[in-house]
Amino acid sequence: MLKQVVKSLMPARLVRELQDWRDLPPDAKAEKKTDRRRELQSDGGAERCLRASLDWLAAAQDLSASADGGVARHYSLVSGWGKSYPETTGRTVPMQRRARDACWTGSCRFSSTMAVFRAA
């Protein structure tokens, strides 16, 4: 009875957030807590952000659930990397090549394998 009264007084969004929190695995809860405690870091500039983005895309390719050379369509704290998705991979190839041409060559190791995946 008390539970229903409290629930009726809480906004629906807050109820959903609490239910979502309850259902998260321990590792996901720990990561969310760490994010809340972390202060904003100083801005490292555009190149640092671009490198971090490309590193994330490389991880999305290397760790996709389908392990077929494509880029995962999502990442979840609950289930990890999703399966690759041709459209995700196809849209990533041109952007990654432009970044490589504009900035550097070392971090852009994955465009050729994505191009093969896209063509398949």
Image (cartoon, helix red, strand yellow):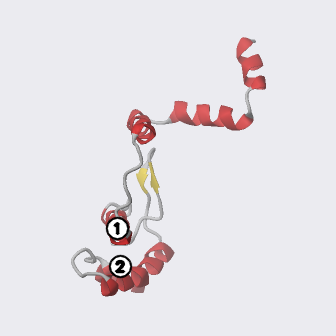
Residue receiving disc 1: 61
| Count of marks overlaid on the render | 2
Q: Earlier in the sequence, mark 2 or mark 1?
A: 1
Using the image as rendered, state which of residue 105 and residue 75 is in the foreground.
105
Residue 1 appears left or right of 64? right
Q: Is residue 13 above or below residue 90?
A: above
Farthest residue, direction top: 1
The answer to whether one can see residue 115 in this image is: no
Of the residues shown, which amino acid type is indicated by label 2?
Met
Which picture quadrant has residue 90?
bottom left
Residue contact between numbered discs 2 and 1, judged by CB atoms under 8 Å: yes
How far apart are labels 2 and 1 at the CA level?
Answer: 8 Å
Residue 64 drawn at (x, y percent) = 37, 62
Using the image as rendered, state which of residue 56 and residue 24 is in the foreground.
56
Figure quadrant of the C terminus: bottom left
Of the residues shown, which amino acid type is indicated by label 1?
Gln
Which picture quadrant has residue 27?
top left
Residue 13 drawn at (x, y percent) = 69, 38
Residue 2 appears left or right of 23? right
Residue 32 drawn at (x, y percent) = 44, 39
Q: Which mark is residue 114?
A: 2
Secondary structure, mark 1, is: helix
Figure quadrant of the N terminus: top right
What residue lies at 42% left-to-right and 85% top-to-bottom?
94
